[in-house]
Each structure stands twice: as C-alpha cells, then as structure tokens.
Amino acid sequence: MRITSMLPDMQYAMQQSQQALATAEMQVATGRKVNQLSDDPTASASMVVSLTDSANVDQYTSNIGTLVPKMQTADSAISQIVTELNTAITLGTQGANGTNAAQRPAIASEVAGVLATVVSQANASYSGGYLFAGSATSTPPFVAASETYTSANGSAGSPLSSSTALTAGSITTIGDASTGDTFHFQASAGDTVGTLQTAIANAVAAGTLSAGTTASINASGQLSISTNSNTAGIAVTTNDAALGSMSATPNTQVANAYAYVGNSTINTAQIADQLSVATNVPGDSLFTTGSNVIGALSALITALQSNNPSITQIGNATNAISTALNSVNQQRVPLDNTISEMNSEESFLNQETVTLSTQQSSLVGADLATAATNLTQAQTQNQAVLAVAAKVLPQTLLNYLSQPSA
Amino acid sequence: MASLGSVLSIAVQSLQAADGGLQVTNNNIANANTPGYTRQQVVLHESAPSTTGDFTAGDGVTLVGYQSVRDELIQSQIQQETQAQSGANAQLTSMQQIQPTFETSSTDIGTEMSALFSSISSLGTDPTSNASRQAVLSAGQNLATAFNTASNTLTTQQSGLNSQVTDDVGKINQLTQQIAALNPQIVQQNATSDVQNGGALQDQQNQLILQLSALTNVNVTQTNNGITVTTGNGTALVVAGQSFSLSTSAGANGMTQVLDPNGANITSQITGGDLGGSIQTRDQTIGGSTGLLNQLDTLANEVGTAFNAAQAKGTDLNGNAGQNFFTIPATTSGSAANIKMAITDPNLLAASSDGTAGSDGNLANFSAIQTNTLPSGQTPSGTFSSIVYQIGSVTASANAESSATTASLTQLTDQQNSVSGVSTDEESANLITYQQAYEAAARVVSTVQALMTVTMSMVTS
C-alpha cells in the first residue's frame, strides 16, 4: 500500500486521544460517569424513578417530623385530662360519703375547677389549630353552653323567614351539652331557613338534640335556636352568610355546661408509600359521643350542688365519670400507636434514604479511583501520540537530497 | 538505415517525453495538498518500430498523455460513507441540543413533578395553612413552566431544522447545476484524449458529487454522456448536461416539505446526508405520532386532566366544588407548550372532602395521581423516564454511528490516498529521474550536433 502522507492518520489519532482525555477529565471533575443522557440512557431513565422515590422518602420524613410533636402535644393534653378525671372520681367518692354533707359545696367547687381544666385541655391548640376539633380547627371545639343562640342577621325591618335562602355549602353546627351529641347541617343549593328548622326538628326526634330544642324566628326577625330549660345548654356555630354569626343570648349561659361544636372528621397524612395515618382524634369521640366526659362532670357538679342531693345521684355521676375515663383511655390508644408507628417508620425511612443514595451512586457515580486511573492513562496516551507525531511528520525525502549544483 | 536526422528526431521526442514527465511531476507537487486532487502519471509508449531493408529499429518514445490514477469503487464507497456520516451528525447535533433540558437538574420535569406531589403531601399535615397551600400552587406553576420550556426546546429545534431543509435544498440545486455543466466538458475531453479519466475536470466533478452526498442520498451512474445522478428513489437530478431542481413548500403543520422536479412530495423518501438526517430528526424523532413532542404533550395533557379531576372531587376553602387546577388545551397537541395554572388563589385549592375548611380528605386523590397509571399506560414519572431513555438512546446511537462512519471514512481516505494521493517523496524521486532523462536526451542532441558539424565540414573542405 502506498503511503502518501501520515498526516490524516495522525490527526485522527490525536482527535481520538484528546476525546478520551476530555471524557476522563470530565468524569474526575464531576465525580459522575454519566454526565449526559447519552452516556447511559438506561441509567439515566432509572435515575428519574430513583430520584422520585428519594423525594417521596424525604417528604415522608418531613411529614413525620411535623406530625409527631403535634400528636405528642395532643397525647399530653389527654394525659392531663386523665389525671384530672381521676381527681374528679376521688372527689365524687368523697362527696358520695354521707358524712361529708357539709363539705359538698366545697367539693362541688373543686369539681368545677376540674371541669374547667378538662375543657381547657380539650381546647388545646398546636401551631394555630385546635387539636380536638376534627377538621373545624379554627375555633375552639368546646364552648360554654347557653339556653339560646340568635343570629346576627335579621331585624324588625327586614326579618329572616323560613323561606330565606341559605348559602349552598354552608355548615351550621349545634352542640348539645346534655346529650353530648352534635348536630351538623350542610346546606345544599335551594335550601332555606325552613329546611334547617325541619332538620333540627328531626334531630330532636332522633335524640341528637335535647327534647324541646327549637329553631324559630324571634320578634326581632332573627333566627333563634333555644332549649326549653335552664339546665340544658347548647352552643351554635355557622358560616352561612345569610344568617351571619350565631351568638349566645346574654344571661342565658348554663353553668358548668359545655357543648362540642367541632366535627368528626379525621384527617390523614402519608408517611410511607402505602401508609397513611390518622393525624387527629376528634373531640367528640374522645369526650362526648358514647361516653360523655364533660356531661358526666357537669352532672356531678349539679348533684353535689343540689339542695337535696341523693347519695345515689352522686354515686351514679361518679360512676359515669369512671366509665367516661375508660372510654378516654381507649380512644387514646390509637393515638399512642400512631406515634410509635411514626417513630419506627422514621428509622426505616432513614435506611431507605441511604439505600436510594447508594443506588443513585451506582447508576451514575464514578468510582474515583477508577476515574483517576483512567485520567492518568488518557494523559499518557495523549502525550505518546503527540510525541510520535512530532517525530514522524517532519521527515521527507527532501531533507536528505543535496541541493542541485549550480 | 538510421540517419542523423532520425536520431535527432528520436532525441527530440525523448526531450518531449522528459518534459512531459517534469510537467506532470510539477503539477502533482503543486497540487499535493489540493482536496480531491488525483495524481497524474505520464503515459509513455514505445513508438512503432520502422523497418528499412533488413534493419528494424525502434522509433523512440511517444508521449501519449497524462493519466489520472483513480479508483472509482473507493470513490463511490467514500460517497456513501459521507452520506451516512452527515446524516448521523445532523441528528447528533440536534439531539445534543435537546438533551440538557431533560437531564436531572433543579428544574426538569421529573424534579418539578416530585416537588408538586411533595407539596401536596406536606399540605396534608396542615390543611388550613395558607403558606402550604401557596406552596402547592407555586409547585404547580413550576411544573407548568418546566413543560413549557421542554416543549419550546423541541419546537425550536424543529424550526431550526426547517431552515436547514430549505438551505440544504438550495445547496443541492446549486451542486446539481454545477455537476451537469461539467458533464459535456468531460465527455468532450475524453473523446479527444487517448487516455480516459478526465483529469482536473473529473476531480472537480467528484468533489461536487461528494458535497452532494453529504447533503442527501444520491445514486451515481456512469453513462456515455457523463454522470447521471438520481435521488434514492429514482428521480433524476442530473442527466447529461441538464440538471433538475428540487423545491420546497410549507407543509400543513409548518414543516417544510421537499418536492421533486415534478412537484411530488418526496420528503419522507429522503434518507441519508444532512437533509435526510434533518428530516428524520424533525419528523420522526421530534415530531410524528411516536415522536418526543407528542409524548411530552400527552404527558402534560394527562397530568393536567388528572389534577383537574382531583380538584373537582373536593371542596375549596370557600365551600365550593374545586375548579380546574391547570389550564390545558382541548387537544393533546400543544398541551406542553400551553399548560399553565388556572388558579392563583390558595383558597381555591380543593383539599376538603366534606366541605369543612380543615379537612384534607381530597388530598388522597391528588397523591394517587403519582402512583396510578395514566391513560397512556405508565405513572407520570415512569412516562417521563421513558422519554428520557428515548432521548438518551437516540443520541447515543447517532453518536455511535457518527464515530463509526468517521473511522470508516478515515480508512477509506487512506485507501484512496494510497491510489490517488501525491507522495512528495515519490515525486521528488521522479523529478530526479526525468531530470536525468532530459540531460541524457540533451546530450544525444549535442552529440548529433557535433556529428553534423563534422559531416558538414567533410563536405565543405
């Protein structure tokens, strides 16, 4: 084969060795063997999925970090309440003792103090939201009960009526201190004040609200919701613009009575790919529905304060508190379980983070020792090619021919 | 019987032959670095011997002509390899410009989708937090922007490739004209010369054909009237002295189409060369029903639709059913370019499932979008991962082909140089040879001159 010039081959060889050198330098500088998608399409595609997993794990860890303190705050509030209830049981037992008759008023005051503390703990908040209100976290869930609540809207000149339309989607809540239940009403399109009144009547019939609770338009044209006794109390909230806010009629407050105006919604949050946990315990399932802690304490106070208390009455009220306490302890269990579940999930997630990091390194990371060796080799190779080119290219026959004689 | 006269005339022929050799050597050395130059050799034949009586004597050397040393097979292989290399390079250049937008960074689609789902999960721990709600909307906006950017990268490439198509067709037409113009000249030169291979004109034509091959796939056949050039599917571009032009027209969707001399649309039949590579990248890799743009649009449309559906299932903070989260066009096409947020007020995020402000029950429907398969068959991140794979693998293939064809061309060029290249060493040696031949012939002439002088003096004295 005739060789005419070695330049094209030399150029190609130099190009190749410089490309190899550039690649090796890039790998050492970035610490990655995959610096663009085409370096390894499969690894690049797998990285997309792995990074999504990492982002999820990071979020779950963050969620746990947010939720654990909140739920621990809730748990310690309940813990306080349990202590108070035990105190109340002791007080009730004292009061039921026939020989302590003179001390009953004093005991009643102490129990009232316990009730106030329990309500205060039940209204505990964390980071701007009430812990035991279900999803209605912007207002305190346990409100002092009154006999009558009236709407802000309505006047003699422009009264509300049963045909006044309600705002679709609005929620009206009536908590009943005696039954311990809460009535919820969400307005649909086309509902009127009359629809609400009917619903309230049905709730009374069903026993959710105390017998004798009515909703009517009063003389001033306002919607008035009231019980028919001064021992039964309610608390009402609404966000319906047609009614305006509901407020207790002055001087109708029932002593030592509190009603629940939150709801039963349980929110969940995700702490693992297939694992969501409840993030709250609604106040009604803890304190009122099923076994009415608040109501039992109120009843005990009433029994102790009455002019003619019967031992049986006081004893029953005390037992009711014991039963309620059992219920609180039971309702507390899922909360405690969730806290420990989150703690163990956290350790698992920490492990997952490491696993995913390792996976990502193996997909696109360069082993630095190998990369450094490759770089040295590429440098040596490049120098060799350049040295050969320098030696070989300048040689031609003309270097060796003598000049023609003149 | 040989006479001094015949000796002289043979010597003169020798001088001419040596002259010719020197001329060819000179030409070769001058053109040693000219691209496409084929070295020439002087063709010398022994003159027909003359017979005088009983004597038969040679009649010297005849300078027949200058012959180019070329190998047509290698030339044709180089043309084909050049076609393949240009095609691969056209695709590689485009894909390398597309790649960075899809690499993992803080703003690529995959990262922004993850961030959006993370913000939703975070909202679940505190559904009434305005800051958390705002974070969800911001994340949604970032995702929309990521889609817009990616779509823009692809359409910008297509637009650039459109210009490239028009440019290439213009260049092709210029080249075919020049090639056609050379055909009659070469035919005539070959007719009047005793040696074939066309010399400088053929070199020029070969260079033009090589440039043409870099642009598109052509078939070259040798005929009596010169070179015939046709497109890959048989349409004539050059026949004898005539060339036929390609033209372009704006296509239905703005994609420039290539028309043959008869007006038929041959866009999809052009393969190879820069034009073929550009068309393939524009119409099949980026565009088309399986192209990247369609996949991106489908992903944007399906994710947008899913988010809107999740919103509709819940209630916002104002107590109303959730409105659309994203605004997307009705058709898939253009979804990635036009997707944007439909809500900017954090209160409109429909987290609640029961109408109360603090409920987060509807967020599960949003989170499910991440893990459920979209109508096109994979989860959102799975779909994006497939797009990433496709881009990487097309680029890697183009890169591999570019390297392979470059290596192949280097080898073929070596082979061609081996046959047709000028070796300065060889020419230097030839220079000495012809110089000495000239000196020898000149010596004969001066000897004959001396003898003639002697003869003349014989007569005159």
Image (cartoon, rainbow, N blue to C red):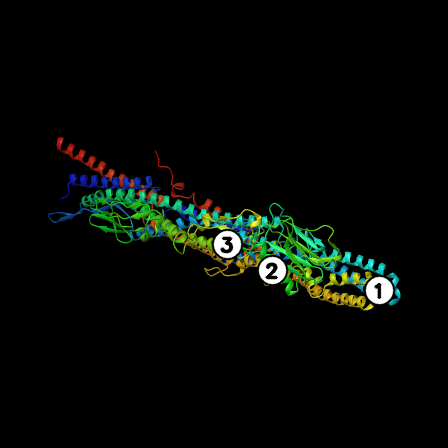
Neighbourhood count class around disc 2 (C-alpha, 10 Å): few under 14, some 14–19, many 20 upward: some
Name the quarter where the C terminus of chain B is drawn.
top left
* SS at mark 2 in the image: helix
Q: Which mark is in front, 3 or 1?
A: 1
Image position, residue A292 (x, y; %): 72, 63
Q: Which residue is mark 3?
A: B308
Image position, residue A211 (x, y; %): 68, 62
- Distance from Cα at disc 3 to Cα at disc 2: 34 Å
Q: Which mark is in front, 3 or 2?
A: 2
Callout 1, which amino acid?
A: Gly
- Distance from Cα at disc 1 to Cα at disc 2: 41 Å
Does B342 sit left or right of A70 as displayed?
left
**Marking on residue A199:** 2
Residue nearer the viewer, B280 or A231 = A231
- Distance from Cα at disc 3 to Cα at disc 1: 62 Å
Q: Chain of mark 2?
A: A
Residues flagged by tags 1 and 2 on a common chain: yes
**Marking on residue A95:** 1
Image position, residue B143 (x, y; %): 52, 50
Neighbourhood count class around disc 3 (C-alpha, 10 Å): few under 14, some 14–19, many 20 upward: many
Q: Earlier in the sequence, mark 1 or mark 2?
A: 1
Callout 2, which amino acid?
A: Ala
Name the image quarter holding residue A108: bottom right
Q: Chain of mark 1?
A: A
Residue nearer the viewer, B453 or B222 = B222
